[in-house]
Image (cartoon, rainbow, N blue to C red):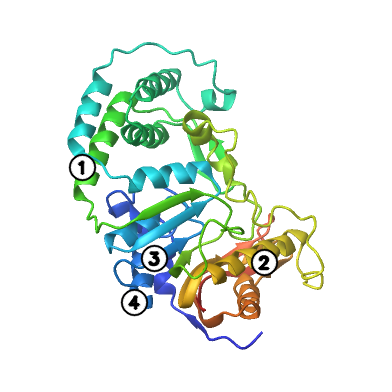
Amino acid sequence: MHSVLEAENFELGKLVTFIPNKKYPVYNWFHFKEGFSRDFVLMMIDHFMIRKNRWILDPFCGVGTTLLASRERGINSVGVDVMPLAIFVSQVKVAEYDVEKLKAASRNVFAERFVRTDVTNVSSFVRRSFTKYALEDILFFRNVVGKIEDPIIRNFFILALMISSEHVSYAYKDGAVLKIRRRQHVPPFRPVFKRVVKKMINDVKRFKDGKALIKIVEGDARNLDFLEDSSFDAIITSPPYLNIIDYAKVYALENELFIRSANAKGLRSYIGLNVNDIGTEFSDMDVPPIGKAYFRDMKRVLLEGYRVLKDGGNIALVVGEGVFPDRIIPVHLILSGISQDIGFTVEKILHVNRRTVTDHQRHKIGSALESILFLRK
């Protein structure tokens, strides 16, 4: 591996988190802890000087932040993700809406007379996650919304249901797992749902649409054969980090209640998950088998990125170091070496976050970096 310029700017750390999106309409629909921010994407668009009508790819698009930010600037984009929940949320966020039709649908939905729904058809975990009254309301409105004929409007209200359900749930996301925490005061579901729908409709009116093409595909970032060679000006993305978190479990409530897909996968459903057939290429690498599998898969992702990028095209890749009980794996450096072997120029590694990590006994393992890799074809 050739030497690479490394720099630090920890003031940018918050931009590679989802937190700044909370203040922006549409971006803040459905909190996605694993995502980065609109501000980060716009900063990368400016850095790479990507002009209107060009094309950006995000092969791990999550809930569509790259796609929305690109649209604001009038830049075309393609988003790919393996997780049906992510695809669904992204599609709802980037859809074009008629506000008057949304208002009419809202009036119809909330005019429906309540009919009690059998709650025994959902899992015991879902039943433990809500009061009986909240769950009955959620299932009632799910049935009402399911009868909306227009799929774009129907999905808008399904996402509103999803967001509202989290406000009245006992379940909360704690790292890699969902936990149940009973609380005394749970707001009634109907007014919460009504408030979320009203806010989302107002967000549609407030969003500054730069008019651009957006395509969203449920697919595998290691195999983008549906995309043409040399067709993108830039890739702005963040792959799953090297860890053992299965986000299918973290989003179990959303998947069961609203996505209801037998194919509901997690963010870690393929990158580094299969530790078999690693091959000899990474056999000498001093990392656990899951690390070897991770870098094998990420090499395939980067090869596809190289293929679909135009000459002179750029990648902004947000990555975090891998934390294991006995070591911290410098993911940014290993991916830089792989990128150089493929043919990329690694223009810079910018470290934007540093966190102290400990083992289960609270003994310090070290500090783990979160970084942006700047690659150029």
Q: Position of residue 192 (x, y in %)?
A: 30, 30
Q: Is residue 158 left or right of residue 282?
A: left
Q: Which residue, as the protein is rendered here, is positioned at the far bottom?
A: 3
Q: CA distance from mark 4 to mark 3?
A: 12 Å
**Dot placed on the residue nearer the N-terminal end, 3 or 1:** 3
Determine which quarter of the picture holds residue 359.
Answer: bottom right
Of all residues shown, which one is farthest toward the left? 100
User: Residue type at mark 4?
Assistant: Met
Q: How many marks?
A: 4
Q: Say which of 363 and 116 sits in front.
A: 116
Residue 305 point in image, percent of width and height: 55, 67
Residue, disc 1: 202
Residue bearing mark 2: 365
Q: Are marks 3 and 2 in contact (CB under 8 Å)?
A: no
* Residue marked by disc 4: 49
The local crowd at label 2, few if under 14, some if 14 to 19, many if 20 or more residues have their Cα within 10 Å, is some
Residue placed at 50% from the left, 54% from the top? 80
Classify 38 as above or below 161: below
Give the foreground label among 4 and 3.
3
What residue is pinned by disc 3?
55
If you read the primary sequence from the N terminus, does the residue marked by circle 4 or circle 3 appear first? 4
Q: In the structure shown, which secondary structural element does the residue marked by tag 3 occupy?
A: strand
Q: Which of 243 and 75 lies nearest the eye of the viewer?
A: 75
Amino acid marked by disc 2: Ile
CA gap between label 4 and label 1 equals 31 Å
Dot 3 amino acid type: Trp
